[in-house]
């Protein structure tokens, strides 16, 4: 829902390799532009923070100009700036925060240093309309796999659980590396898994049985699974058998997504919620989308998943988060805040 009196928010995302700038009024997206330095990392097999920081510096102003032009607004019409304050890479965050503070100060408007991960859920409002009263948030990205009880995205988020080791995207990237796929491996493993047989190889599900199942009700563990894939590949190598990469990816993907979806549905039922909102780069995963839809439907739960373009890091998620905070009357951040690379998921914005 949007009214003309809702503030016009300029959102800045620079947590990792994407430089995103977007304009949002209320729950309406006016423009969203992204530049990425991802192509520079394929040869290193991972992000190089110094290259990413420099790329943000180079891309920020052109990306902002393009977003303003797309929205058809002038910079001086902006009512508040929202910038990702964390979690993320400190150098990358610093570039976005510097830019955001300079803009807000020059324009004489407030700034919100917002939680980038919660932004992955907030972006859903721009697509599916006002957020439900209370919902379970499943955040799945390169760095996070968390279940959140969201009573209000602007004021009240409770972390129910998360991964004890690797995040889902990280596990996919590691298995991609084991199979010799290009970085980042996640989308490649996903593509291959769609050609494989999910039942051919049964890999272990972490924290799914015995005492662990109760003790770590809403937590995940994917590192044992990655080790199982590694062992499986080594055993084939010793035998001199060529691995069937599609079946390995399908079996591995099934194990990850079985855990994520079973626990998300359980959290929803346990907390009397009727909606799961999914966000983060890994929510592009085809099997996650399919299995979660199936299981949620069977349990009478609605699933809200942003379209693929909003799954990876983008300015819209930051502007959407800023818009939630501004409309809820949350105090803006002070001028002194700096990046928080480990920002807690229960902290919506910097004080
Ligand atoms: O949220 P995001 O863009 O960055 C972080 O904030 O972490 O997530 C990136 C992660 C990477 O690990 C990438 O491999 C993974 O999401 N990813 C996927 C897929 N698309 C992106 N993993 C599995 N299947 C996909 N289709
Ligand atoms: Zn992200």
Image (cartoon, grey):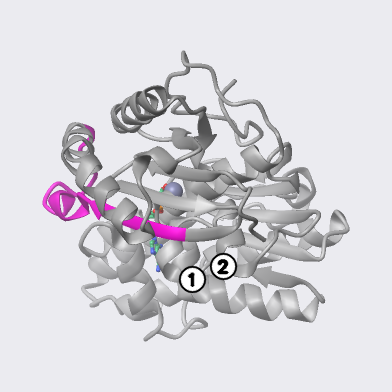
Q: Which quadrant of the figure contains the C terminus?
A: top right
Residue 210 forms part of the magenta stretch? no
Q: Outermost residue toward the top? A: 336
Whether residue 98 is situated above or below residue 212 in the rendered picture: above
Q: Earlier in the sequence, mark 2 or mark 1?
A: 2
Q: Residue at x 70, y 65 (%)?
A: 262
Residue 127, numbered label: 2
Foreground mark, 2 or 1, reads 2
Q: Residue at x 43, y 69 (%)?
A: 308
Label 2 – label 1 distance at C-alpha: 8 Å
Q: Residue at x 65, y 26 (%)?
A: 331
Q: Residues within 10 Å of mark 2 (few under 14, many from 20)?
A: some
- Give left or right: position of 200 versus 321: left
Residue 220, numbered label: none
- Give left or right: position of 15 versus 163: left
Residue 153 or 292: which is nearer the viewer? 153
Instruction: Give the secondary structure at mark 2.
Output: helix
Residue 307, numbered label: 1
In the rendered structure, which segment of residues is drawn in magenta?
30-49
- Quadrant of the image occupied by residue 76: top left
Confirm whether residue 222 shows in the render. Answer: no
Instruction: Give the secondary structure at mark 1.
Output: loop
């Amino acid at each position: 829902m949007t009214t003309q009196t809702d503030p016009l928010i300029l959102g800045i995302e620079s947590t990792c390799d994407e430089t995103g700038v977007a304009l949002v009024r209320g729950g309406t997206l006016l423009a969203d532009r992204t530049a990425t330095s991802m192509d520079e990392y394929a040869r290193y097999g991972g992000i190089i923070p110094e290259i990413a920081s420099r790329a943000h510096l180079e891309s920020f102003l052109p990306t902002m100009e393009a977003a303003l032009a797309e929205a058809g607004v002038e910079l001086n019409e902006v009512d508040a700036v929202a910038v990702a304050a964390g979690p993320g890479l400190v150098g990358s965050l610093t570039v976005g925060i510097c830019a955001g503070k300079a803009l807000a100060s020059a324009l004489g408007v407030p700034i919100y240093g917002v939680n980038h991960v919660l932004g992955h859920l907030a972006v859903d409002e721009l697509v599916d309309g006002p957020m439900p009263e209370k919902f379970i948030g499943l955040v799945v990205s390169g760095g996070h796999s968390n279940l959140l009880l969201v009573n209000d995205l602007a004021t009240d988020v409770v972390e129910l659980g998360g991964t004890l080791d690797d995040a889902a995207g990280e596990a996919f990237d590691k298995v991609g590396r084991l199979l010799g796929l290009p970085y980042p491996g996640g989308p490649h493993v996903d593509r291959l898994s769609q050609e494989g047989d999910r039942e051919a190889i049964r890999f272990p599900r972490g924290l799914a049985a015995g005492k662990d199942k109760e003790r770590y009700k809403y937590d995940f563990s994917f590192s044992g699974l990655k080790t199982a894939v590694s062992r499986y590949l080594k055993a084939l190598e010793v035998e001199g058998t060529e691995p069937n990469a599609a079946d390995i990816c399908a079996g591995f993907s099934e194990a990850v997504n079985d855990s994520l979806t079973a626990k998300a549905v359980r959290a929803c039922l346990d907390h009397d919620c009727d909606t799961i909102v999914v966000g983060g780069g890994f929510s592009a995963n085809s099997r996650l989308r399919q299995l979660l839809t199936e299981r949620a439907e069977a349990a009478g739960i609605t699933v809200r998943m942003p379209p693929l373009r909003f799954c990876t890091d983008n300015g819209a998620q930051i502007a959407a988060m800023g818009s939630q905070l501004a409309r809820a009357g949350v105090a803006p951040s002070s001028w002194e805040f700096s990046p928080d690379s480990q920002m807690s998921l229960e902290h919506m914005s910097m004080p």
